[in-house]
Image (cartoon, rainbow, N blue to C red):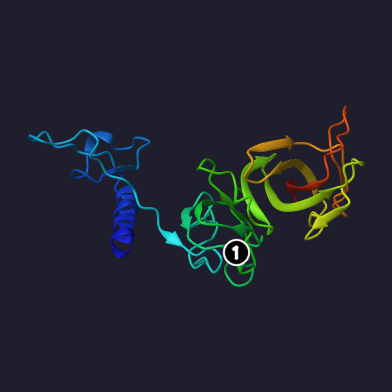
C-alpha cells in the first residue's frame, strides 16, 4: 500500500513539472502536456520464450466502504475543489455506508466490487461530503438476487441510483393478486423521488422468468398484480420469487 501512495505522489509531482509518468520507463518528455497523466502500458520482452499475453495490471486500493472515512484536510474550493468526485476504489465489505463522521451524506448499500464517488458539484456538507458511492457498471452480475436486503444495482436512471430487493409471493391459482408475501411485501423507502423501475417475477434455479413488469404496484404497501398492462396473469398455485428495482 505504501508503494501505491508513493506512486501517486510521483504522479502528483509530475503534474507540477508538466511531465507525464510511465511506469515501464523513465519520465517521457515527448508526451509532456498531453492528456495522458500515467502511462502503465507494458514494456514486453523480446527475449526468447517471452509470451505476448504476459502483461501488467493496476491494483486499485481495496477499502471497507461500510466504515470508510474521507480526509477533508485539503478538500476546499482552492486546493482540492473536486471533493473526491470520480474517486475509484475496490470495496471489500457488505453492508450500508455510514453517514456520520467524514463520510458520504447518503447511505448506500454496498457489496464487494468497484465503486466510484459521485460528487459532480464538488461540495461538502458539514463534516461529510455531499456525494454518493455508486457501483461501477459491468461485472458478472448486475446485483445479488439472493438477498432480501437492499442492494445497489449497476443501473442509473436520470443520474439516480437504482436499488433492488428480493422477495417471494404465493399465488392461489385463481387470482392475479398474490395471497401471501414471504417474508413480507417489498416496500420502497419513502422519499420525494421514490418510484418503481421494474419488477421481475421468476423461479430461482429454474431459469424461468415469467415477467419483468407489473400491471399494478403500490410502492407504500408493496402489493402487486401480476401480469402486464395488456394481459393479467393468473399463475398456477405455488411460490414465486420476485425482485423490485426502484429509485428512492
SS of the residue under disc 1 = strand
Report if residue 138 is visible in the image.
yes
Q: Quadrant of the N terminus?
A: bottom left
In the current view of this chain or complex, which residue is farthest to the left? 48
Q: Residue at x 49, y 67 (%)?
A: 71
Q: Is residue 87 left or right of residue 134?
A: left
Pick out the residue farthest to the top: 230
* Residue beneath the point at 61% across and 69% down: 127
Query: Which of 191/119 is in front?
Result: 191
* In the rendered image, the vertical position of residue 132 relative to residue 197, given as above or below: below
Q: In front here: 35 or 96? A: 96
Visible residue check, residue 190: no
| In the image, residue 66 above or below residue 209 | below
Residue displayed at 56% across by 49% down: 135
Q: Residue at x 60, y 48 (%)?
A: 143
* Number of other residues with Cα within 10 Å of mark 1, as a class: few under 14, some 14 to 19, many 20 or more: some
Residue at the spot of label 1: 95
Amino acid at each position: 500500500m505504501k508503494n501505491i501512495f508513493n506512486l501517486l505522489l510521483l504522479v502528483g509531482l509530475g503534474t507540477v513539472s508538466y511531465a507525464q509518468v510511465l511506469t515501464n520507463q523513465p519520465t517521457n518528455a515527448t508526451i509532456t502536456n498531453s492528456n495522458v497523466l500515467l502511462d502503465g502500458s507494458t514494456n514486453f520482452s523480446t527475449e526468447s520464450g517471452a509470451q505476448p499475453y504476459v502483461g501488467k495490471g493496476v491494483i486499485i486500493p481495496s477499502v471497507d466502504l461500510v466504515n470508510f472515512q474521507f480526509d477533508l484536510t485539503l478538500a476546499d474550493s482552492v486546493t482540492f475543489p473536486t471533493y473526491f468526485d470520480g474517486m475509484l476504489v475496490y470495496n471489500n465489505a457488505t453492508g450500508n455506508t455510514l453517514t456520520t463522521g467524514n463520510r458520504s451524506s447518503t447511505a448506500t448499500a454496498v457489496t464487494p466490487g468497484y465503486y466510484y464517488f459521485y460528487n459532480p458539484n464538488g461540495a461538502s456538507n458539514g463534516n461529510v461530503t455531499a456525494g454518493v458511492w455508486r457501483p461501477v457498471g459491468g461485472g458478472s452480475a448486475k446485483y445479488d438476487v439472493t438477498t432480501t436486503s437492499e442492494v445497489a444495482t449497476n443501473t442509473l436512471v436520470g443520474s439516480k441510483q437504482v436499488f433492488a430487493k428480493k422477495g417471494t409471493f404465493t399465488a392461489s391459482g385463481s387470482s392475479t393478486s398474490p395471497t401471501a408475501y414471504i417474508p413480507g411485501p417489498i416496500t420502497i423507502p419513502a422519499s420525494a423521488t421514490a418510484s418503481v423501475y421494474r419488477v421481475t417475477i421468476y423461479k430461482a434455479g429454474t431459469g424461468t422468468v415469467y415477467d419483468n413488469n407489473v400491471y399494478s404496484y403500490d410502492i407504500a404497501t408493496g402489493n402487486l398484480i401480476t401480469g402486464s398492462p395488456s394481459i393479467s396473469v393468473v399463475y398456477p398455485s405455488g411460490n414465486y420469487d420476485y425482485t423490485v428495482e426502484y429509485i428512492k
